[in-house]
Image: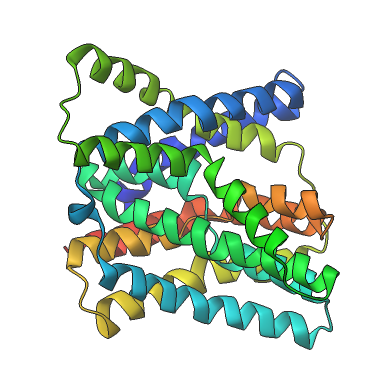
């Protein structure tokens, strides 16, 4: 377990470096925003395109994995929603808290870290987790918030969700990569080298950006943030473990990757949604901060436990 902790520690040290740079003012919030934009639109997209272009959709798409992850995530989502209702929160706040409980930092942290720690074969299951998070739960939170405010569903909401997905560079990169693969087009050596160099910037850039963005976050309602962090770091991976290991017939290696992906801390895009709609952004900020700090230990424990099973 110590060896796994030492393997994951460098990733969190880069996050810590970014946090220190942001906290001291050496790296401004404007600089963080531009770095995040570079990673999101260029480096991470290059990494995802290169990975998916060298795979086929048939190699990646496993409905057992999708259903297992979706079922387990829905249980934790429902639990967080139920606790929010017991506290008499509005639908919008309950939806945001449920999002914190199940949506991990798969894009910025999971893709680069798990591919390096568990091998490039991990990228397929990680992309499935990312797709479910974005397509299902990313759409659900928008539907719940806008539906609660408008009092009804409308075509405009669905259109807005569709356009949001089409503008997401991670989805575009994955789809474009699989399309390239489906056409059986070889990647020219120069292009492959270009994508490798650009994609190589995704790991340090994303981790540094996570840390720098955390420097601007403060702890509001820490007891609620602690509960949401517990859901994300413990209950979510535990539910996914039960689902992939005992309820669905998921191969051991794939199961280990999906469990590890479920153990990641709260994603930064939950804060973007909360801030965009004006729904408890400081509460989400606290959950991201607390879960990321705690993940230094919990992610190593989960990866160590899952790695021993394959």
* Image quarter (top left, top right, bottom left or bottom right) of the N terminus: bottom left
Q: Which residue is drawn at 71% across and 65% down?
A: 96
Is residue 309 among the parts visible in the rendering? no
Residue 59 against residue 109 in the figure, above or below: below
Where residue 297 appears, x then y in whole percent?
Answer: 47, 55
Where residue 301 appears, x then y in whole percent?
Answer: 38, 60
List the single residue furthest toward the bottom.
86
Q: Which residue is drawn at 30% across and 56% down?
A: 125
> Horizontally, is 161 left or right of 114 in the view?
right
Residue 38 against residue 288 in the figure, above or below: above
Q: Which residue is drawn at 29% across and 85% down?
A: 247
The residue nearer to you, when weighing 222 against 125, is: 125
User: Which color scheme does this rendered protein use?
Assistant: rainbow
Label total for image: 0
List the single residue furthest toward the front.
155
Where residue 254 appears, x then y in whole percent?
Answer: 23, 61
| Image-quadrant location for residue 77 | bottom right
Residue 267 against residue 216 in the figure, above or below: below
> Horizontally, is 187 left or right of 176 in the view?
left
* Image quarter (top left, top right, bottom left or bottom right) of the C terminus: bottom left
The residue nearer to you, when weighing 137 against 262, is: 137
Where residue 81 appears, x then y in whole percent?
Answer: 67, 79
Is residue 211 among the parts visible in the rendering? yes
The residue nearer to you, when weighing 16 against 37, is: 37
> Horizontally, is 171 left or right of 52 in the view?
right
């Amino acid at each position: 377990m110590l060896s796994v902790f030492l393997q994951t520690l460098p990733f969190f040290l880069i996050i810590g470096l970014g946090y220190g740079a942001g906290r001291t003012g050496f790296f401004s919030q404007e600089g963080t925003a531009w770095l995040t934009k570079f990673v999101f639109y260029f480096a991470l997209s290059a990494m995802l395109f290169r990975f998916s272009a060298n795979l086929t959709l048939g190699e990646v798409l496993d409905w057992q994995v999708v259903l297992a992850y979706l079922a387990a995530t829905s249980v934790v989502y429902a639990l967080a929603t139920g606790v929010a209702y017991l506290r008499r929160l509005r639908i919008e706040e309950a939806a945001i808290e449920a999002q914190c409980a199940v949506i991990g930092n798969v894009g910025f942290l999971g893709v680069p870290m798990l591919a390096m720690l568990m091998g490039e074969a991990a990228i397929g299951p990680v992309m499935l987790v990312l797709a479910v998070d974005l397509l299902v739960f990313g759409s659900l939170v928008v539907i719940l918030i806008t539906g609660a405010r408008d009092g009804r569903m409308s075509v405009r909401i669905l259109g807005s969700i569709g356009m949001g997905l089409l503008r997401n560079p991670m989805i575009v990169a994955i789809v474009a990569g699989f399309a390239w693969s489906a056409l059986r087009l070889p990647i020219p050596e120069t292009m492959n080298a270009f994508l490798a160099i650009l994609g190589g910037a995704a790991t340090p850039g994303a981790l540094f950006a996570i840390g720098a963005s955390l420097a601007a976050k403060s702890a509001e309602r820490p007891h609620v943030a602690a509960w949401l962090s517990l859901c994300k770091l413990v209950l979510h991976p535990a539910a996914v473990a039960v689902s992939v290991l005992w309820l669905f017939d998921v191969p051991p290696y794939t199961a280990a990757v999906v469990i590890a992906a479920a153990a990641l801390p709260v994603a930064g895009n939950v804060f973007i949604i909360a801030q965009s709609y004006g729904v408890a952004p400081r509460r989400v900020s606290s959950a991201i901060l607390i879960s990321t700090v705690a993940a230094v230990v919990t992610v190593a424990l989960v990866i160590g436990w899952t790695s021993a099973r394959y």
